[in-house]
Amino acid sequence: MNRGVKRHCSNPHTPNHLGCQKVMTAPLFQLRRMFWSLYGRFVWDEQKALWKAPQVRHIVEILTARRARSGERVLDAGCGTGNYTVALAQAGFHVIGIDYASGMLARAQAKVTHALASNLSFQQVDLNERLRFPDSSFDHVISISVLQVVVNPAFTLEELWRVLKPGGTIVLLHVPKPESHELPLRDVIKHRVTNFDNRTPLKVVLVAAKSWAERTERVRYWTSVELQEMFRTSKYNVLSVDHGPPTIVVAEKPKNLNVA
C-alpha cells in the first residue's frame, strides 16, 4: 500500500465504483484542500468550457420546473466558486453553497450582491463528513462535478439523502472521462492553458497538477448505467438521465419512505 493512503470501504460488499477506494490520510488531505483553494482563486472561473453557461441555465430550469412553492431551499453540495449557487438565488430559491476549499468560497462570496444576500450564503463544509444540517432541511440538492472526488460516494449520497426532504429533488452533473485522456499529458496541459486571458506560471502549475490527477484513480468516471445504480442503491428514485456530455441525473427522495 502506498504511503499517505489507507484502504477504506463503508461496506465490504459495495461495488468498487460505489464506495471503496484508497483514502488520503490527514496531511495528504490538507494538501489537496490547499490545492483546490488555490485552483478556485486563480483558475476555476477562467476555464472556458462551452457547456458551462448553458448547463447552469439547464440546472436552474430543472429545479424551477420542480418547484412547488416560493422560498424553497436548495443545497449546492460542492459549490466551487458559486456559479450555480448564485444563478439559483437569482431564480428565487434560498440557497446554501458548501465547499471544503476556502479559496473556492472566497471567489463565491465575492459574487454575492446586496440584492441576493438575504437568500444566499456559503459555508465551509466537508462532504466527506456528516453534514451539519438537520434531517429533511432542503427541498432540493445539486451536486456539480464533485461526487467523483469524495472519499466515499455512497456515504455522501446517503448524507444528501438525509438532509433532503421526502419528495425533494437531487440533481447530479457528472463530466465523463474526456477524450483528451488518450493524448500525451503535455499536449493536454498546453491546450488548457491557451484558454487563459492572463497566463501565469502559477496557473500553468495548477493546470498541470489537475491534468495529472485526472489520470489517477483519485478521480472516478462513471457511465450513465453506473450512476443510476448508485442512486437506486442509495434509495433515490431516478426521474431522468441526460446522457450529455455532461451526464445529468435527476432523482427524487421518495415521498412515502415506507415504499422506497
Image: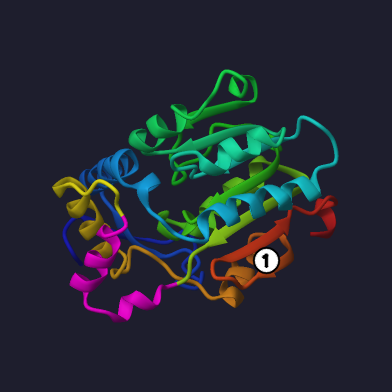
The one of 196 and 8 positioned closer to us in this rendering:
196
Instruction: Give the x, y percent position of residue 257.
Output: 80, 52
Q: Which quadrant holds the C terminus?
A: bottom right
The one of 229 and 91 positioned closer to us in this rendering:
91
What colour scheme was applied to this rendering of the protein? rainbow
Q: Which residues are magenta?
A: 177-195
Q: Is residue 7 left or right of residue 128?
A: left
In the image, residue 216 lies in the stretch drawn in magenta: no
Q: Is residue 26 left or right of residue 234?
A: left
Q: Which quadrant holds the N terminus?
A: bottom left
Instruction: Give the x, y percent position of residue 174.
Output: 52, 63
Extreme residue toward the front, this view: 197
Q: In which quarter of the view is residue 94 placed?
A: top right
* Residue neighbourhood size for the residue with mark 1, other residues' Cα within 10 Å, grouped as few (<14), some (14–19), many (≥20): some
Residue at screen point 46% across, 54% down: 146
Residue at screen point 67% across, 47% down: 60
In this rendering, the answer to whether 58 lies above or below 107 is below
In the image, residue 187 lies in the stretch drawn in magenta: yes
Residue at screen point 25% across, 56% down: 207
Instruction: Give the x, y percent position of residue 39.
Output: 30, 45
Helix, strand or loop for disc 1? helix
Q: Check disc 1 and report the residue beneath it.
A: 232
* Dominant secondary structure (helix, strand or loop) of the stretch shown in magenta: helix
Q: Say which amino acid is labelled 1.
A: Arg
Q: In which quarter of the view is residue 249 placed?
A: bottom right
In this rendering, the answer to whether 91 lies above or below 50 is above
In this rendering, the answer to whether 99 lies above or below 120 is below
Q: Is residue 229 left or right of residue 39?
A: right
Q: How many marks?
A: 1
The one of 235 and 126 positioned closer to us in this rendering:
126
The one of 147 and 58 positioned closer to us in this rendering:
58
